Amino acid sequence: MFEQTFKNIDDILHKDAGCSNELDYVEQTSWILFLKYLADFEKDKKTSAELTGKRYTEIVEKQFRWEVWAMPKTKDGKLDHQNALGGDDLKDFVDHKLFPYFKKFKASAESADTIEYKIGEIFNELKNKLQSGYNMREVINLVDELRFQSSAEKHEMSHLYEDKIKNMGNAGRNGGEYYTPRPLIKTIVKVVAPKIGDKIYDGAVGSAGFLVEAFEYLKGSKDLTTKDAEILQKKTFYGKEKKSLAYIIGTMNMILHGIEAPNIVHTNTLAENISDIQEKDRYNIVLANPPFGGKERAEVQQNFPIKTGETAFLFLQHFIKILKAGGSAGVVIKNTFLSNSDNASVSLRKLLLESCNLHTVLDLPGGTFTGAGVKTVILFFTKGEPTRKVWFYQLDLDRNLGKTNPLSENDLAEFIKLQKKKEDSENSWSVKIADVDTTTFDLSVKNPNRKEEAALRSPKEILHEMKSLDEKSELILNKIKKIIG
């Protein structure tokens, strides 16, 4: 039912003049969905308070509550058409009263780790793009059918929202940067294996996929005490995101997964000088897929000891610096990082190998990231001791990956199994750093355990064979002619 509701909402947004693509659909669904979530959140809090004999003071003033402006109902539970806003009246109310009201929450909130602050941030970043109040009314009616009250409902809703983010990535343009395949994220989280009490960080948070999967992993890791649950809510997950829409989607995604006030900051991570990072700023775990291919300006590069325009290389320096001693990381990066011969690449590999234990490299096939032909590797490292040996695993699939044939958790099962003991196999091997050339620190080692296919012949060899075959053919033809003649 929920899935069909989302499809119906997209159909309405598709015909509105203010929404032109999948990015707009996600953005506009997000703010309406959030207000319905907020209404159910307040209802839950009120019920819980009443059961313990306490009084709950609602966050939202009466005229801005969902059941007043969006869905006033008659005694039989149906939409009260006489009091429900529609058309231009609805659009004017949303643009000139509702959004300005919620924007003020940011300034009046007690602190940044409250849901009031997040409400204010969401409405400061978003704007209503729906041009038709009639379309808006239809969307509101559909969203009202969605429920966020049982854990099963919240779970289903969060997965549907993830699907919307995935579709946005598949839509192309700049949407792909928001979505990392969930089977890959789950695998990275399992290998890094965070524990309750760890502070987990993603400095390129996007849709918050890494933080959400780490939350799901930790929730299922043990029976949570009240203290554990509070630690997970307020003192575990941290992120930074530069782009407005990604910031909102990441915040919404975490809220829908059950983290009430996500510690995500809307800022450019790379604008921070890494020499200013102090011990209090550091994290136990880094999980990230930083954007690659970007070209950062000279003033941004000045924040890093290794100057480079490649965004992902700046992020990697940031991640190494912001990890606590003994902390662990799982970071996605282009596979050319292992072999590029420019000064920045060589210096960065040297930094990584000398300051961290790069214990595992997962080499992924092309097509892992939908819409991006770039080949990637995952670097798994622990900070505080130099690398002695690197275990490599090359994911070799008997099919091409793409939109209709994505990566699955099953594809990565052998990697997880062998990684625990760093076992050799047809797809895995180890390299001692003592054997690596210290002038280049080149890590692009070919798999020694796989038989190479027959080497391609040179054009000269091919021409020689063609000439030989022609000569043989001519001899045979001459013999046939003599027999017939």
Image (cartoon, rainbow, N blue to C red):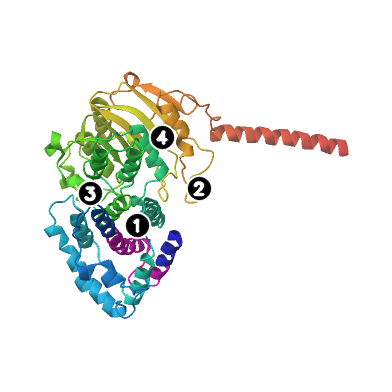
Residue 460 picture quarter: top right
Q: Kindly identify which numbered label has been placed on residue 405.
A: 2
Range drawn in magenta: 11-40
Mark 3–mark 2 distance (CA, rounded to whole Å): 32 Å
Residue at figure coordinates x 17%, y 46% from the top left: 271
Near-viewer residue (424 or 262): 262
Q: Secondary structure at mark 1?
A: loop
Mark 2–mark 4 distance (CA, rounded to whole Å): 19 Å
Mark 4–mark 1 distance (CA, rounded to whole Å): 39 Å
Graded by Cα atoms within 10 Å as few (under 14), some (14 to 19) or many (20 or more), the crowding at tag 3 reads many
Tell me whether circle 4 and circle 3 mark residues in contact (CB < 8 Å). Answer: no
Sooner in the amino-acid sequence: mark 1 or mark 2: 1
Which residue is tagged 4? Answer: 363
Q: Secondary structure at mark 2?
A: loop
Sooner in the amino-acid sequence: mark 2 or mark 4: 4
Position of residue 327 relative to residue 243, above or below, is above
Which residue is tagged 1? Answer: 148
Residue 73: x and y in percent read 33, 73
Position of residue 392 relative to residue 94, above or below, is above
